[in-house]
Amino acid sequence: MYTYLSNSENDTMSLAKNLASKLHSGDIIVLSGDLGSGKTKFTEGFLSYFGLENEISSPTFTIVNEYRVNDCNIYHFDVYRLSSSDEFYAIGGEQYFENGICLIEWGEQIEDALPKDYLQICFSRDFENETKRILRLEPHGNKYDTLLKELPL
């Protein structure tokens, strides 16, 4: 597990851009953490790497937003409203995994539907400083170990 201390929204967005630059179709990032812990800012930074900073909207009610940049599909899921992995399967969610880069907010709720290899980022607030966030990056499987060593953590 790796830890990144973010001192500002810009730090969080910068890490997200750096990570986005290293990902390819088939990569899966699970974003976990309480409301207001930085998942949306991370997603903004991530999408801005692809020139989509003005496109972000929460997929809370649609479950998934789809973006296409050049030859890359990006799928931004918010599975907070799903009651089980069965609902994820019902929308064909697992079919997205190999067809693009997947960002999945609240992905721990569908953990049993996730493939063996994914990167989970757990966000938490520093209650002594409102602008600070603690991001724990945890690779599941072996795929993301090398990638994490390349990030400025």
Image (cartoon, rainbow, N blue to C red):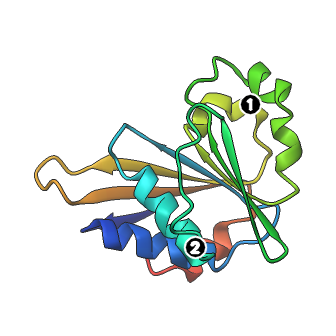
x then y, percent, for residue 80: 55, 29
Quadrant of the rendered structure where residue 59 is? top right
The three-letter code of the residue at mark 1 reads: Asp
Asked if residue 20 is positioned above or below residue 117 in the image, the reply reads: below
How far, Cα to Cα, is label 2 from label 1? 24 Å
Circle 2 SS class: helix
Number of residue marks: 2
* Between marks 2 and 1 in the image, the one whose residue lies nearer the viewer: 2
Q: Residue drawn 81% across and 37% down?
A: 93
Quadrant of the rendered structure where residue 23 is? bottom right
Q: Residue drawn 24% across and 68% down?
A: 7
Circle 1 SS class: helix
Give the left or right position of residue 74, taking residue 14 as reference: right
Q: Residues within 10 Å of mark 1 (few under 14, many from 20)?
A: few
x then y, percent, for residue 152: 45, 81
Of residues 29 and 80, the one nearer the viewer is: 80
State the residue position of label 1.
Answer: 112
x then y, percent, for residue 123: 40, 50
Residue 1 visible in this rendered orientation of the protein: no
